Amino acid sequence: MPDIIELLPDHIANQIAAGEVIQRPASAVKELLENAIDAGATYIHLIIKDAGKELIQVNDNGKGMSPTDARLSFERHATSKIRSIEDLFQIYTMGFRGEALASIAAVAQVELKTKTEEDELGTYIFIENSTVKIQEPCQAATGTSLSIKNLFYNVPARRNFLKSNTAETRHILEEFSRVALAFPEISFKFTNNNTDVFNVEGGKLKQRILSLLGNHLQPKLVPVNESTDFVSIHGFIASPEAATKTRGNQFFFVNNRFIKNAYLNYAVSQAYKELIGKDEFPLFVLFIQIEPKRVDINVHPTKQEIKFEEDRIIYSVVNSAVKHALSKYSIAPSLDFSLDSTIESLQAVTQPFAKNIQEKTKANYLFQSFGEKGKAHFLEKKGDAQQWKELYKVQHAFQLQGDQETQAEPVATSQLENANLNLQKDTFKQEFVQLHQGYIIATTKTGCLLINQHLAHQRILYERYEQVISNQITIQRCLIPITFELAPADAVLLESILDELKLLGYDVEVFGNHTFIIQGTPADVKLGSEKESMEKIIEAYKHEQSEVKLDKREKLFRMMAMQRAISSTKKLATEEMEELFQQLLLCEQPQLSPNGKKIFAKLSVNNFMQLIQHA
């Protein structure tokens, strides 16, 4: 047989690598900023045009590169950080894999100007489609200027999958803010379409936080500083009153590298437990310093998801450090650790720990579980009653039939037709029962319906918002306009949907420098909750996911319906259940939620009896 395996050409291999490393303009921005930091720059200027699609340029005053280094920097796996396998476990710098520039050069037109302090002339390189077109000496200042033009010009499919300019600019702002927060000693400037967005001088971390996230945080920042032999943590958290409905202002850095870790976020949230609402998110900027060998940062191509050698220890230290900071600044109640007199008189305290008691204790199951490494988190509960599972068999059977709305895939129309879900043809008895404060059972002549109350209300609100567009909506004017400030990325997002929000009754104006003024809200927004309502809208809109590209209005309607629908745990009176059901019947599409999830399941008497028998 002829040989069929061939090595890919370099330019194709680089384009494949670019698919992992350079997912969008913000990915290229991140790589270039990190390279500038590793070059020892004290000033970095980021310039973008057309959300990075036309131009991404990073100028720095770092040490620059020699002509040979400048050329080699665009080769795959070229790096100045690694000489042996051991170096992989002692990396404190930002970039190190040597794929970024090669990947960028495969999907864009790249211009590089660089010069070291020792050289009289710098080096100019122009690369297109992984091919060096020009390399020649040039006049240049010490440092590096790298420009990326027409990103994905030769991969039109990738370019078509980019989001709107607003969305891509927001991602770039997020990457810029993360890098600028991680290195407060470096001066940063950010120019978007010839307009300076940020120009921050190098200084202390607190000043950098205020510059990027807003001066309104000045009296609300609380320092965190804890050190152990294993790990040290420092940074700032915000007082509970600074908590918001959006989770954007939460930053974790491990060895100055931004990471995403839900486990550590939970550690902070638990420290704020009972100090903020369940739907609120605390603000924090926390730095974790740990030996690189105890961390695996190569889990994900973006290096934002990492693995810790001892994640439980990190969790405990983060949680206790935040609690200590809250307590130290009299935000959370302090605990009294003095020993109670009744405890001091107990036999276990007053009598010696005899040898026979020691042996008996060591044989105990609880002692053995705690004695083994990490077992404290996996204690088994001996003697638990097994019968509890029987109590939920009927509920589980209902979920198998009617809880399909939790699946991400929408239900096909043909499936609905086959299921014979024609509500109008069935005769309903006026009997409603709420199941686990999340589902409504409505009895019918031939059986019953199991209705998800949250999804049902979503459908009702969604169709109501659609009708609002053709009618004049009532705006409730604020007696005193409300001013609020947002993080840069959130400000860009809100500014892009102001016109759509006005159609729904929100009169919000731009006040400048990421600040907005609420002049009016819909009539059903409670007085005093205007800012909270806006935060919820931003959070829901930001995290709205869809396989199909939707226009802003459609996306906003879906988001508003999700945000303002009754919760899945709200207890309803019989009258409320009946009203919700009647409104659902009046909808044009009562079977599906706005996101295509199934709202109810229909069970006949025979099916219901079979479920009971099999339970």
Image (cartoon, helix red, strand yellow):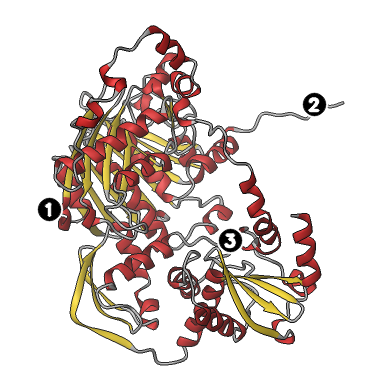
Q: Amino acid at mark 2?
A: Asp
Residue 522, compared with residue 62, is above or below; it is below
**Residue 547 tag number:** 3
- In this view, the residue in front, 350 or 180, is 350
- In this view, the residue in front, 105 or 323, is 323
Q: Nearer the viewer, mark 3 or mark 2?
A: 3
Q: Secondary structure at mark 2?
A: loop
In the picture as drawn, the residue positioned furthest to the right comes out as 1
Q: Which of disc 1 and disc 3 is earlier in sequence?
A: 1
Answer left or right for 614 relative to 142: right
Residue in view at x 37 percent, y 77 percent: 501
Residue 194, compared with residue 447, is above or below; it is above
Res. 123 in view = no
Q: Nearer the viewer, mark 3 or mark 1?
A: 1
Residue in view at x 38 percent, y 31 percent: 95
Q: Amino acid at mark 3?
A: Glu
Indicate the position of residue 248 as horizontal and vertical percent values.
Answer: 34, 54
Q: Which of disc 1 and disc 2 is earlier in sequence?
A: 2
Number of numbered tags placed on the structure image: 3
**Residue 219 tag number:** 1
Q: Which of disc 2 and disc 3 is earlier in sequence?
A: 2
Give the Cα distance between marks 3 and 1.
42 Å
In the picture as drawn, the residue positioned furthest to the top comes out as 355
Q: Secondary structure at mark 3?
A: loop
**Residue 3 tag number:** 2
Label 3: how many Cα within 10 Å (few below 14, some 14–19, many 20+): few
Indicate the position of residue 88 as horizontal and vertical percent values.
Answer: 42, 20
